[in-house]
Image (cartoon, helix red, strand yellow):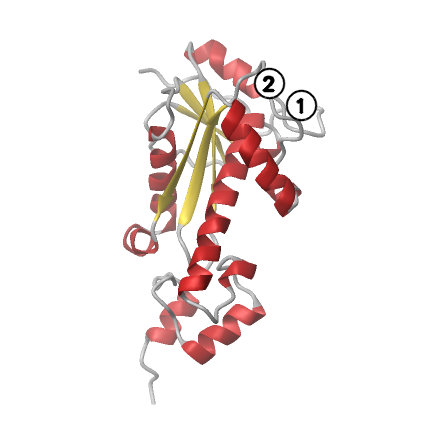
Amino acid sequence: MTTPPNIPAKAKLSRSFPTLALEFLLIESSGGPVCGVDEAGRGPWAGPVSAGAVILNPDDLPAGIDDSKALTHARREALEIEIKARALAWGVGFASVEEIDQLNILHATGLAMCRAIEALAVPPAAALVDGNYRFKLPCPIQTVVKGDSLSLSIAAASILAKTARDRLMVALDAEYPGYGFAGHKGYNAPIHAAALKALGPCPAHRRSWAPIRALLEPTRG
């Protein structure tokens, strides 16, 4: 399988919202369906990293798809339902805290992306991946810097990755109360740092992360 030709990382598209322009270019060069891929949760101190993969139907697009970070919680949840109902295929994958600690966050992110693509009901001929790192995925890829603001498929994937991870963090909040996971979703926040000092890390924390590792290491007198 040949790798599709590079698309400029900063595509010169004078649009204020993502479009399917990059998808159509890659469909033409790859000869088949193209999925967008994005992740959520690379930076938090706790919880898994998630990834979404979406093959949109150009003839049945939900209105208002955008970078998940630009949307409200309610709008993301509404769009998640529409994307799943109207896309040609969608998938979500996770890499666990243990896998993050074992592999490192970069390789764990690639693992989550692989799982998201493998969950697609329609095998993609190629993928548009947010960012500039060329993960080893089950199909040829094209990286796109700031792809969630340029590509509708990547934006849709970012929504699925974010909503799926947020729900999991709410569940972890119930399992490990006191850390505030439902609010900050595992990211660095004053309430999170204070809880760590008071309670110590729980099994949901990434023990390879420096702030967590520092709490686990014996103090030197």
Q: Secondary structure at mark 2?
A: helix
Residue at position x 39%, y 52% from top?
Answer: 48
189, above or below 92, in the image: below
Seen in the picture, residue 133 relative to 23 is either above or below; the reply is below
- Mark 2 crowdedness (10 Å alpha carbons): few <14, some 14-19, many ≥20: few
The local crowd at label 1, few if under 14, some if 14 to 19, many if 20 or more residues have their Cα within 10 Å, is few
The image quadrant where one finds the C terminus is: bottom left
Q: Nearer the viewer, mark 1 or mark 2?
A: 2
Residue 10 visible in the displayed image:
yes
User: Mark 1 and mark 2: span between their CA atoms?
Assistant: 9 Å
Using the image, tell me which numbered label, if any, was put on residue 13. 1
Name the residue that disc number 2 marks: 21
Snapshot quadrant of residue 64:
top right
Q: Secondary structure at mark 1?
A: loop
Outermost residue to the bottom: 221
Name which residue lies at 38% across and 46% down: 106
> What is the quadrant of residue 111 in the picture?
top left
Indicate the position of residue 17 as horizontal and vertical percent values.
68, 29
User: Between disc 1 and disc 2, whose residue precedes?
Assistant: 1
Rendering coords of residue 13 (x, y %): 67, 23
- Asked whether residue 146 is in view, the answer is no
The residue type indicated by label 1 comes to Leu
